[in-house]
Image: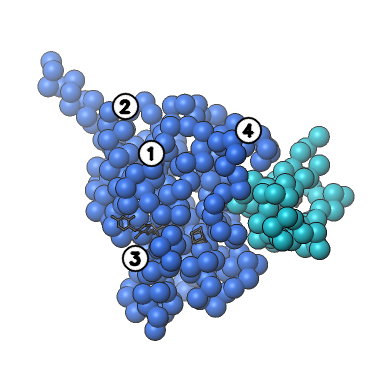
Chain colours: A cyan, B blue
Amino acid sequence: MITIKENYCKGCGYCIIACPTKALKRSNKINSRGIEIPIVEEEKCNKCHICELSCPDFAINVEEE
Amino acid sequence: MISNDEIYEKYIRKGTMPTILCAGCGNGIVLNTTLRAIDELKKDIDKMVFVSGIGCSSRLSSYIKADGLHTTHGRPIAFATGIKAANPDLDIVVFTGDGDCAGIGGNHLIHGIRRNIDITVIVLNNYNYGMTGGQASPTTPLESLTTTTPYDSFEHPFDLSMLAMAAGAPFVARWTISHPVQLVKSIKKGLQVKGFSFIEVLTPCPTSYWRRNRIRDYEGIYRWYKENTVNVKRAESEPDKICIGELQNIQKKEWTEQWKELVERVSK
Ligand SMILES: Cc1ncc(C[n+]2csc(CCOP(=O)(O)OP(=O)(O)O)c2C)c(N)n1
Ligand code: SF4
Ligand code: SF4
Ligand code: SF4
């Protein structure tokens, strides 16, 4: 399961660029500070954790279940 | 692999996220990768001290749930030397900026390396004085625009990793925030080396530096660090790019060990 803490996310999109399988995408979802939050397509994710290492604010979390 | 939530729970002070740093600032990635390296080595965080100077990069020590010193500008290596000399059992990590480490603190850097005291220095090189609004620093690339070089910079920048190698640091590595996996590996190595470890991370300051230097979108910034660097193993084929990777790994006697030997010798 991938979750993004909307209140932590600054919308830099580094997670989107770093993801090797293009499981993360830009979206129209806006948080309370007017920042665009990425969306996840779970089925494309291979749980490599690269997005977590690329997030400057601990906003994205990958759970291996 | 450990998740960000678990890293947060184990090592980050409650309520400090998101950081006060700007959107797209790379410093948080250095915090994340450092904590992952510590976790993978199963280090006891209560036997570590995180020391920093002044600047946006130096904020990192205050996010970690461990002993830390947020010291004065340019002086973290001096404070770290004191801590290590007083208690060699502690593991010391220094977070410092290019201005902090190579400008005002340049002499502490070369003499810390010369002494070969066992600390791990992580330099966040963002090519400018980010915190104070983007003045030129000792690493500002030629022809860059900054608030103090409004017609472009003609001063020759320091290559910090080369400087550390020439000064004799046993372990030197350079990566960028676009190489987080490799960075974790090098921080792990640096923490294990008995002696002065120097890890340079090229990290973006979108607000003060990149805004004035052509690239204004985060994707472009992130890609710049991939496209303008080359691994040391292939450096000869692309001499114009910035050389990254593990650059030096040599054996050398360490200061606290030599001190211990001296004390034993003279107290006989
Ligand atoms: C003795 C002293 N001189 C000047 C300053 C002002 N000052 C604060 S941060 C800074 C520059 C920081 O640059 P750098 O180390 O590159 O860190 P960054 O903010 O870019 O991460 C300066 C000059 C100070 N705090 N103390
Ligand atoms: S874990 Fe890997 S594959 Fe999944 S979203 Fe993150 S970067 Fe993409
Ligand atoms: S890297 Fe983190 S802060 Fe940046 S867009 Fe992704 S989740 Fe948000
Ligand atoms: S000014 Fe630059 S270095 Fe400082 S927080 Fe903002 S982006 Fe980061």
Where is residue B32? Give x, y as percent: 57, 45
Q: Is residue A43 left or right of residue B96?
A: right
3 vs 4, front mark: 4
Q: Is residue B45 above or below residue B222?
A: above
Label 4: state its secondary structure: helix
Lower position in the chain sequence, tag 2 or tag 1: 1
Residue placed under numbered mark 3 in the picture: B138
Q: Which label was assigned to residue B87?
A: 2
Residue placed under numbered mark 1 in the picture: B69
Q: Disc 4 marks which amino acid?
A: Glu
Lower position in the chain sequence, tag 1 or tag 3: 1
Where is residue A38? Give x, y as percent: 76, 57
Q: Disc 3 marks which amino acid?
A: Pro
Q: Is mark 2 within 8 Å of ligand 1?
A: no
Q: Residues within 10 Å of mark 3 (few under 14, many from 20)?
A: many
Quadrant assignment for the N terminus of chain A: top right
Alpha-carbon distance for marks 2 and 4? 28 Å
Single out the residue that lies furthest toward the top. B268
Residue at mark 4 shares a chain with residue at mark 1: yes
Lower position in the chain sequence, tag 3 or tag 2: 2
Where is residue B98? Give x, y as percent: 39, 59
Q: Quadrant of residue B70?
A: top left
Residue placed under numbered mark 4 in the picture: B9
Alpha-carbon distance for marks 3 and 4? 37 Å
Q: Is residue B239 above or below residue B62?
A: below
